[in-house]
Image (cartoon, coloured by chain):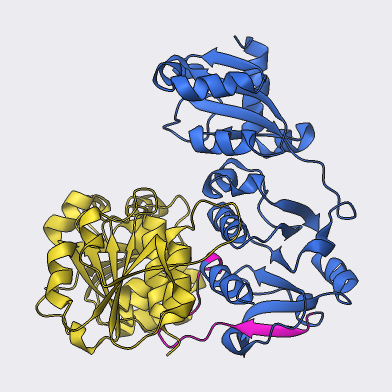
Chain colours: A yellow, B blue
Amino acid sequence: MLSKSELKYYSSLLKKKFREEENKFIAEGKRLVEEGLDSNFNCELICITNQFRETNKELLEKLKSYNIRLELLTERDLQKLCDTKTPQGIVAIFQKPKRQIENTSINDSPIIVALDQIRDPGNLGTIIRTCDWFGIKTIVLSESCVEYFSPKVVRSSMGSIFHLDVIENVSLPEWLADHKKNYNLLLADLNGNDIKSHQINKRSIIIFSNEAHGPASNLETIVDEKVTIKGKGKAESLNVASAAAIIISYMSDS
Amino acid sequence: MLSKSELKYYSSLLKKKFREEENKFIAEGKRLVEEGLDSNFNCELICITNQFRETNKELLEKLKSYNIRLELLTERDLQKLCDTKTPQGIVAIFQKPKRQIENTSINDSPIIVALDQIRDPGNLGTIIRTCDWFGIKTIVLSESCVEYFSPKVVRSSMGSIFHLDVIENVSLPEWLADHKKNYNLLLADLNGNDIKSHQINKRSIIIFSNEAHGPASNLETIVDEKVTIKGKGKAESLNVASAAAIIISYMSDS
C-alpha cells in the first residue's frame, strides 16, 4: 500500500517543478513501463490496480522478478498518478538519468539531433521515436524546448525515451560552436540546399527548429549548411516531426 | 449579430453528428480562416471579436471584400464556437465540399494516399499537410478513419485541408481492387521491401495503416507490394505520420 503522503508525493511528479526538484518522472501504461524496466533507467516504484493484476498474470510474474517495490492501488488512487483519462492500470516511477554534457559519449555518434525551441510535446516525443528507429543515440535540447520527461513526451515517444541519451537545457549556439570542428552542422530550414542532393561526408549534427518561429538567427551564422525538403504543393511548411523524419531518413542512408 | 438560436446552431457543428447532418465545419484562427477563404470551399459565416477587429484592420478590409456574412461576437460567445481554449478571436463556418468517388478526377494524380483506420486526428492532419507539401492532390479514407473535418484534424492540417480532395468512408478493399489496373498498390508495413530500393515505374496508391493494429488482413492480399522503412534502433515502429512523410518523400523523388 502507498500511504497518503506517498501518494501525494508521487502525484506531485505530474508537475514539472517537482519532476525537476526530485529528478523523477512517471510512465503510464503497460508498454511504457515494460520498456522502462528493460532499459537502464532506475525504477523506484510500480503501481497496479486489482483489475490489472487479474488480467496480466504473466507480466505480473515478470514485474515481481525485478525486485522493485510493487503496490496495489485502487483505480481512483492510480488515476491520481496519471495524466491520461483512461490509464491502463499500471504506472511506474523512474529516476531521471544523470547525464551531463561532458559525460555523454557523443563522440561515438555519427548523427546527433539538436532541437531548437521545440515546444509541442507530441512533436518532441515523435522525433525521439524517429531517432530511436534510425539508431540515433543522442538528442540535444535547447533551453526553451518542452521538458523531455513530461508525461506527454514520454507517452508519444512510445518508450523510445528510455533508449536515447538526452542533453537538456543546452545553450545551442555555444554548444554547436564547440562541436563544429568534429561535426558538420546542418540546419533544417525552409531555404536551403535540397537534402536529397546533400553529400554525407562526415559526422553530422542536424538541427531542427520550431516551425512557427523558424531557427534562431544566431544559429544560422554558426551552421555549415542549411538543408531543406523541396515541396511542390501549397502547404507553407511541414510539421517539424515530419520534416525530421524525412531528413533523418536521408541522412541514415549512408 | 448572431441570434441565440444561430449561435446554438453553429456551435452544434463542434459535434460530429451535426457536421455530418449539416455538411458544414468550423475553422478557428487567422491562418486557417484565411486559407479557407483563399480556397474553393464555400464560407457561410465569419465571426470575430472586438479585439480581433481592433488589431487586424488590414485583414478586416480583406474579409469584408469577400462579401461573406461577418459578425461581431463577444469573446464568450466566440468561445462557444471553439474547440481550443485560447481561440484567436476569429472563426469561420465552411461548407464541406460535395465530392463523390466517381466525380473526383483521381486519374490525374500520379500518387494517391489511402489511409486505413487512422484514428488519431493529429496524425491525420499531419499527413494531410505532408501530402499538400509534396503536391499530392487526393486522399482516400477508409470507413474507420477519424472524421476529416473534425476540429483537431482541420487545425493540425494547418490549412492543407482546404487544398486536397478527400474521399471519405471508402471500403478500401473494393476501392483498391477497382484501381489495381491503373495503379501500383503499395502498402506501408513493418515487413516489406525497403522503400529506398523501390523502383517507381507507374502511378501509385500508397496505403498507410493504423500503427497499433497494422494493416487489415484483406488489404495485404490486394496490394502489389509491401514497402518498409528500414531501421536499426530499438523502436518497435515509427509514428504513422512520420512513416508517411518518409515514404511520400521518397515516392515524390521521381
The picture places residue B47, in percent across and down from the top left corner, at 56, 21
Q: Is residue B65 left or right of residue B239?
A: right
Quarter of the image with the C terminus of chain A is bottom left
- Above-or-below relation of A78 to A72: above
Mainly helix, strand or loop, the magenta region?
Answer: loop
Residue B80 appears in the picture as rendered: yes
How many marks are shown on the rendered structure? 0
Depth order, front residue of B78/A246: A246
Q: Residue A143: where, in percent of width, then height? A: 19, 56
Magenta residue span: B223-241
Q: Quadrant of residue B180?
A: bottom right
Identity of the residue drawn at 47% across and 57% down: A239
Q: Residue at x 66, y 17 (%)?
A: B69
Q: Does B226 lie within the magenta span? A: yes
Q: Which of B52/B225 is in front?
A: B52
Residue A216 forms part of the magenta stretch = no
Q: Is residue B33 above or below residue A226?
A: above
Horizontal relation, residue A144 to residue B72: left or right = left
Return the x and y of residue A127 as percentages of the image width and height. Answer: 39, 67
Residue A127 vs A109, above or below: the answer is above
Front one among A198 and A57: A198
On the rendered image, what quadrant is the N terminus of chain A found in? bottom left
* Residue A29 visible in the snapshot: no
The image shows residue B4 at horizontal and vertical percentages of: 62, 11
